[in-house]
Image (cartoon, rainbow, N blue to C red):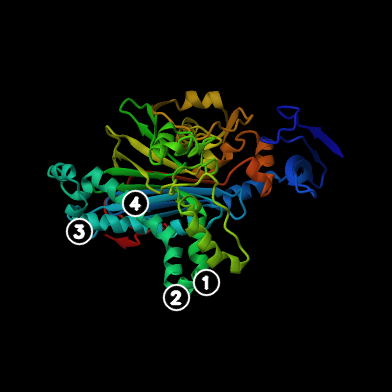
């Protein structure tokens, strides 16, 4: 047997950051050893070493590409949309989700013709239930609120926005009104998720049970787990909406997924525009917001170690009912819906006193954007990704990698060389939501993938260092979560096509009209 050593960064076995030790190779197979946490027979958690198969580079490439899609969609207004998406699971099943949809303006709309073009990524936690549901209904919820804005604009305006809108062609051209509609859609949808089990419980308790304070067994109710699971699991959500009629871009962020745009200037230079802030307890603005929403005696406990009540990292999320329900509601629903299914809700944090501590209300960013030729607002591409990508790469890394890909770079390129080939400057700095990013050892980027999403995931997990990439992708769940998170990436860019060409060649053809 041929054995080759790969020395760890440190010789100590660190529980918080396990390292690889060595891998061995034969003509038939290759393996590597990995220190992992295990629960021992005495119930205590300790470290042991597992020998794992090292995937071939062909198998790694297959896994990187098996969930990838690339689509091109011409629209009647002459815009050609290009879309690339890729995902790599770490959890089993993956807890990320994504969706897209084109909603065409109705002919009776005063702002017609034009489209609303939606893209979303969701980063689930404590299960995939919330993120999967959001991928099916979030865009529709926002579309509904926008349709109300168009049909009854006055009802959604403050006095200030009514005055402002006198100078706008229509209510949906007012960024304040549109942002309010998006925020309302997010918060109303989350309210439905959180309250659905409560309504079922209330409608199925009779007077006798109420008087005797007997909790009914509703575990076999057809909607028991269908409503409980999306409420008690959770998900961050990131949505971008392009309004082609008014040349507007809106980015709504709930949680710590991130959107980054690349914009060109008239002199040919490029800059990075970070369109979201990571919403975690390490964001000073988020910490101050949550502290202001609760009594002064909770100030030191609402955020501990950068997490809500010491547990949840994102400060905004859909679901996560254990941070939103009062204790008595949490316990009643657990007894009614879960116990009969041999399930138990996770206990609520001991410091929980005045819920809710987590909100789904997004922060909405607005930019003007040209869909044909670069102008003063020259955004030319947009990257949306769950935090698994941003754990590994900076916003500037990602923008440079996308720009290099769009410019046709090929092969393995040193990191220093890329910065000279595609120089960028930063327009809006990243507000980092983690205490630190992972530091990989590779000094080079790989430009070998046609799909830009796959391209970004490959470079997040090793880039030009093929051995590092193989090791990271080879680690199976649940051990992989100590080394990488689920990663989902969506990249969108556009160019000018022939006016009137509407022969869609993608699955994102118009599905609805406002």
How packed mark 2 is, by other alpha carbons closer than 10 Å (few <14, some 14-19, many 20 or more), is few
Element type at mark 2: loop
- Please tell me the numbered disc located at residue 206: 2
Image position of 200 (left or right of 464):
left
The Cα–Cα distance between marks 3 and 2, rounded to whole angstroms, is 42 Å
From this viewpoint, is residue 392 visible? yes
Element type at mark 3: helix
How packed mark 3 is, by other alpha carbons closer than 10 Å (few <14, some 14-19, many 20 or more), is some
Residue 507: x, y in percent? 42, 59
Residue in front for this viewpoint, 262 or 194:
194
CB under 8 Å between discs 1 and 2 = yes
Residue 315: x, y in percent? 46, 42
The Cα–Cα distance between marks 1 and 2, rounded to whole angstroms, is 9 Å
The Cα–Cα distance between marks 2 and 4, rounded to whole angstroms, is 47 Å
- Residue pointed to by mark 1: 216
The label nearer to you, 2 versus 4, is 2
Residue 225: x, y in percent? 53, 66
The label nearer to you, 3 versus 4, is 3
How many numbered circles are shown? 4
The Cα–Cα distance between marks 1 and 4, rounded to whole angstroms, is 45 Å
CB under 8 Å between discs 3 and 1 = no
In the rendered view, would you say 434 is above or below 334? above
Labels 1 and 4: the sequence-earlier one: 4
Image position of 14 (left or right of 339):
right
- Please tell me the numbered disc located at residue 327: none
The label nearer to you, 3 versus 1, is 1
How packed mark 1 is, by other alpha carbons closer than 10 Å (few <14, some 14-19, many 20 or more), is some
- Outermost residue toward the right in this view: 1
The quarter of the rendered structure image containing the N terminus is top right
- Residue pointed to by mark 3: 151
The Cα–Cα distance between marks 3 and 1, rounded to whole angstroms, is 44 Å
């Amino acid at each position: 047997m041929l054995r080759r050593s790969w020395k760890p960064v440190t010789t100590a076995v660190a529980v918080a950051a396990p390292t690889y030790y060595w891998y061995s190779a034969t003509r038939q197979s290759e393996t590597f050893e990995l220190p992992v946490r295990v629960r021992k027979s005495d119930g205590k958690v300790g470290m042991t070493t597992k020998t794992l198969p090292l995937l071939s580079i062909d198998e790694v490439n297959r896994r990187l590409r098996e969930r990838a899609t690339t689509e091109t969609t011409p629209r009647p207004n002459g815009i050609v949309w290009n879309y690339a998406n890729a995902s790599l699971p770490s959890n089993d099943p993956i807890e990320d989700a994504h969706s897209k949809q084109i909603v065409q303006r109705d002919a009776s709309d005063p702002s017609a013709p034009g489209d609303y073009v939606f893209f979303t990524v969701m980063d689930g936690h404590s299960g995939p239930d919330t993120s999967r549901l959001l991928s099916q209904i979030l865009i529709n919820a926002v579309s509904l609120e926008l349709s109300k804005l168009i049909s009854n604009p006055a009802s959604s305006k403050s006095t200030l926005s009514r005055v402002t809108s006198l100078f706008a062609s229509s209510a949906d051209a007012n960024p304040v009104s549109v942002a309010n509609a998006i925020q309302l859609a997010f918060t109303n949808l989350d309210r439905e998720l959180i309250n659905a089990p409560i309504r079922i419980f209330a409608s199925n308790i009779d007077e006798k049970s109420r008087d005797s304070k007997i909790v009914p067994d509703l575990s076999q109710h057809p909607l028991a787990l269908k409503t409980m699971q999306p409420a008690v699991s959770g998900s961050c959500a990131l949505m971008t909406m392009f309004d082609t009629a008014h040349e507007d871009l809106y980015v709504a962020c709930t949680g710590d997924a991130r959107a980054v745009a690349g914009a060109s200037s008239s002199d040919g230079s490029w800059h990075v525009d970070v369109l979201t802030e990571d919403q975690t307890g390490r964001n000073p603005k988020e910490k101050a917001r949550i502290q202001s929403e609760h009594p002064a005696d909770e100030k030191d406990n609402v955020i501990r170690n950068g997490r809500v009540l010491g547990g949840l990292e994102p400060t905004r999320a859909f679901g996560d009912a254990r941070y939103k329900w009062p204790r008595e509601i949490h316990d009643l629903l657990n007894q009614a819906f879960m116990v009969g299914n041999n399930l138990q809700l996770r206990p609520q944090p001991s410091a929980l006193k005045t819920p809710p501590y987590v909100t789904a209300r997004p922060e909405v960013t607005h930019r003007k954007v040209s869909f044909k030729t670069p102008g003063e607002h020259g955004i030319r591409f947009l990257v949306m990704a769950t935090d698994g990508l941003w754990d590994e790469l900076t916003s500037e890394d990602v923008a440079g990698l996308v720009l290099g890909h769009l410019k046709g770079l090929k092969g393995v390129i040193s990191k220093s060389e890329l910065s000279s080939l595609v120089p960028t400057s930063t327009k809006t700095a990243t507000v980092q939501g983690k205490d630190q990013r992972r530091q990989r050892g590779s000094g080079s980027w790989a430009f070998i993938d046609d799909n830009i999403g796959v391209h970004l995931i490959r470079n997040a997990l090793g880039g030009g260092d093929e051995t590092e990439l193989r090791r990271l992708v080879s680690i199976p769940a649940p051990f992989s979560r100590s080394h990488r998170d689920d990663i989902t990436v969506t990249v969108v860019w556009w160019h000018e096509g022939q006016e009137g060409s509407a022969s869609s060649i993608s699955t994102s053809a118009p599905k609805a009209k406002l």
